[in-house]
Image (cartoon, rainbow, N blue to C red):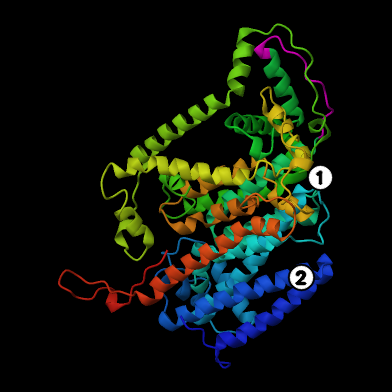
Amino acid sequence: MALRLDPSSPWVSQLVGYVLLATATYIYAVRTLGSSRTGLGIFLSFILVQLLAYAWLSSVTEHAPTPYLDEVFHVPQAQVYCDGKFDVWDDKITTPPGLYILTILGTRLSKLSCSVYSLREFNVKIISYLAIAAIISRAQLQQLKTGSHSRFSTWYSIDSFWTGINIALFPILFFFSGLYYTDVLSTFVVLLAYINHLGRIRSDNPSVASSIRTILVGLLTLGVRQTNIFWVVVYMGGLEVVHVIKTLCPESTTTPAFKTLSEQISFYVWRYSLGDIHDPSLDIASPIDLILSAISIAIAAVCNLGTIVCRQIWPHLVVLAAFVVFVAWNGGVVLGLAIYVLQVITGSTKPGPASNNNPKKISEPNQSAALKAFNYIGSNHTLHSVLLLAGALVVTTLIVRYNTIIHPFTLADNRHFMFYVFRYTILRTWWLRYALVPVYIICGWLCWLTLQGNPSSSLPCQKRQWILTPFDTKSRALSSPPTSERPSSIASPTIDAATIPPSTSTALILLAAILSLVTAPLVEPRYFILPWVFWRLLVPAQPAFPVSGSGPTSLVSLYLIPLLETVWFLLINAATMYVFITRPFYWRGPDGELLDNGNVQRFMW
């Protein structure tokens, strides 16, 4: 996997050009963000990812210069477009032509040919900008958590840069930066939509220009891959619904004492309908809080639908309408649509005044037995955990039993890693697929636990926001350690923002992931890229070990985990690239005859 530095090599000249472009990006960042450190960080991140991607492209070009696997469809289609024949289409391609159109625009602007190398190089450029988009997304999330509502902030934390680089190095994503596939561009344009979304929720009333951008970027994401609709409309649109609800700011009121269950339910439904929803910090949320959060948001959305549509989400509805037209014309989300639930389990703020008052309940009168039982069950977290575990076991087992659909393509192509995953797990013996059920649940639980972060890292004032429940969520929030008792590794505003967990409404990521995965006919690692990217953007930074005092040791504790993540990703990338480059093989028939015209086959994601 040698990196040749021949000045006459096309990729060297292109690299020089993009170094100059990165320099321009740095100058722009300095002038726009007002911080030379931020500009330098963006510049260095761009160059680092670009160098690694060009090294990978160089190796792929040397050992696999001709189109490989899905490139056999993508490359000729792009070259047909390059010749101006836009009425020619390969029916075997199941994604829209966005990749080819944008590639042709890029090659014509840079006066490059539509060779296999140039087409692959397009993804090298995109993966570099994807890293910057991830950095900006992470930084804007942190600024929103700390209440910074200016369009640009003068600081981007180290955590933002490290997160962005690690997202670009995510093995499944980075691998395809050296091939002409849709995944890198698809992820990039969705991140552009996410950046636009984060800008929209900085204000109570988005501008017309912002709404137009939302439509244009949304349509762009659909033009690259149809299933992006679930992230652009369901996830981002859903988060904007929550944002509008939180800006309604109903007048605060004292929680009365209730005698009957119906009185209590009526009160909370009334408060939810006004926009006083239940959306606590994820680190103090129990399973019942997830249910209450969904109920409160649904009630508020229905009762304030006109305001929500007119003020915020009408651009998303335009994008959704375009998607519906496409589905009606195409006959489905993707060609060969099949609902495949197993794929889900194999992958596994600005407060309103009413939410800051924390009103006390007045002394409770004699309560009905139904009310006491309801509140007791709602506050019994041991019971919740037992029911959740039992329910997860039952549902997952039923999914495995009745929805284990193994697509013929999965077993027909031994070039993909998933072929061997299926072969040596659920196809090996009938009981193994059921033995994996606890593994699925544990993996899902670990993903959720990681999103919760360190319970002591949330600011106490943040934990008290958006809590409206008859159960004991508020008491758990108020029992959090005061600022003086929080770990001393929380040493600056940027670190504070990095360690704050998301709110409960972030569970919308689960809905978007489920919709995007169950509508895919195949189990492919590539389909998990976007769910992982958004999950990773939301994961709060956590100290690797407790420390006393501030200083270098506390920073080492905080950034050790991202460092280990980087090393881990580099090792996986090195292993998969090594196998792809150095372990070619040939398909042979029973009589030893070469198949597929004697073409070289390679292992890949």
Numbered mark located on residue 204 in the image? 1
Relative side of 389 to 537, left or right = left
Percent position of residue 98, x then y: 57, 66
Residue found 65% across the figure and 63% down from its top: 162
Whether the magenta-drawn stretch holds residue 408 is answered as no
Q: Earlier in the sequence, mark 2 or mark 1?
A: 2
Percent position of residue 490, x then y: 73, 50
The residue segment tinted magenta is 249-262
Percent position of residue 306, x then y: 74, 36
Numbered mark located on residue 129 in the image? none
Tell me: residue 228, above or below residue 468.
below
The amino acid at mark 1 is Asp
The answer to whether any part of residue 220 appears in the image is no
Which residue is tagged 2? 39
Q: Is 109 in front, or is 329?
A: 109
Q: Nearer the viewer, mark 2 or mark 1?
A: 2
Work out which quarter of the rendered image holds the C terminus and state it.
bottom left
The amino acid at mark 2 is Gly
Tell me: residue 474, above or below residue 543.
above
